[in-house]
Image: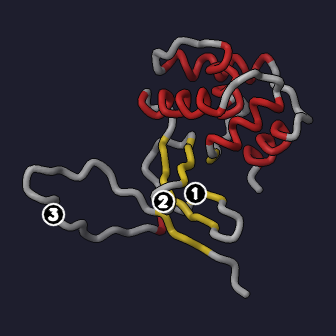
């Protein structure tokens, strides 16, 4: 478990309260994207980036973390806020199985490992990935991005 994931886990268990510094980092993160710093946005932003660690979260895990902070926020608000963060370029959405979305604070292009046994998403080493050629886009279309998710399961 990476440090950022551990801190989010501890926060989710209600054992760590956000510091003023983490809230300031979250507020600056919102400001750089031109997003209004509402109380709920600042809380969610601080949980995502307040400690300076990159992390992968689901809406549900972020919702639980916010509840652990005593924040009265609905799951719908968390989804809407994550969408706004993605639209502003603050997060990258990674979809697994076409239905499960993870949100990554590292917005640079990089591959991911999806650990099937515990439904966890982690970064894969970019320097080891080589894509030699992509297929031509169909007429009238252009390639917007290439997402690489490598599915893993533990050996028996």
Q: Position of residue 17 (x, y in %)?
A: 86, 27
Q: Identify the residue at horizontal 77%, vertical 22% (top origin).
A: 71
Q: Quadrant of residue 25?
A: top right
Q: Identify the residue at horizontal 13%, vertical 59% (top origin).
A: 138
In three-dimensional space, the C-alpha distance between marks 1 and 2, rounded to whole angstroms, equals 6 Å
State left or right for residue 10 relative to residue 130.
right
Secondary structure of the residue carrying numbered label 1: strand
Q: Identify the residue at horizontal 76%, vertical 38% (top origin).
A: 64
Q: Position of residue 74 (x, y in %)?
A: 67, 28
Pointer 2: what residue?
Answer: 111
Q: Residues within 10 Å of mark 3 (few under 14, many from 20)?
A: few
Name the colouring of the figure: secondary structure
Q: Residues within 10 Å of mark 2 (few under 14, many from 20)?
A: many
Q: Position of residue 128 (x, y in %)?
A: 48, 68
Q: Position of residue 123 (x, y in %)?
A: 58, 57
Work out whether 8 lies above or below 18.
below
Q: Quadrant of residue 54?
A: top right
Secondary structure of the residue carrying numbered label 3: loop
Pointer 3: what residue?
Answer: 136
In three-dimensional space, the C-alpha distance between marks 3 and 2, rounded to whole angstroms, equals 21 Å
Front residue of 32 and 17: 17
The N terminus: image quadrant: bottom right
In three-dimensional space, the C-alpha distance between marks 1 and 3, rounded to whole angstroms, equals 27 Å
Q: Quadrant of residue 103?
A: top right
- Residue 123 is tagged as 1
The C terminus: image quadrant: bottom right
Contact between marks 1 and 3 (CB within 8 A): the answer is no
């Amino acid at each position: 478990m990476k440090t950022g994931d551990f801190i989010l886990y501890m926060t989710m268990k209600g054992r760590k309260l956000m510091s003023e510094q983490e809230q300031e980092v979250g507020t600056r993160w919102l400001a750089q994207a031109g997003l209004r710093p509402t109380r709920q946005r600042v809380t969610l932003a601080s949980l995502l980036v307040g400690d300076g660690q990159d992390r992968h979260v689901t809406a549900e895990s972020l919702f639980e973390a916010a509840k652990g902070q005593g924040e009265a926020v609905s799951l719908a608000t968390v989804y809407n806020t994550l969408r706004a963060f993605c639209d502003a370029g603050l997060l990258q959405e990674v979809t697994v199985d076409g239905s499960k979305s993870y949100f990554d604070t590292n917005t640079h292009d990089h591959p991911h490992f999806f650990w099937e046994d515990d439904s966890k998403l982690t970064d894969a080493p970019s320097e080891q990935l080589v894509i030699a050629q992509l297929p031509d886009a169909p007429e009238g279309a252009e390639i917007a991005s290439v997402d690489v998710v490598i599915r893993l399961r533990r050996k028996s």
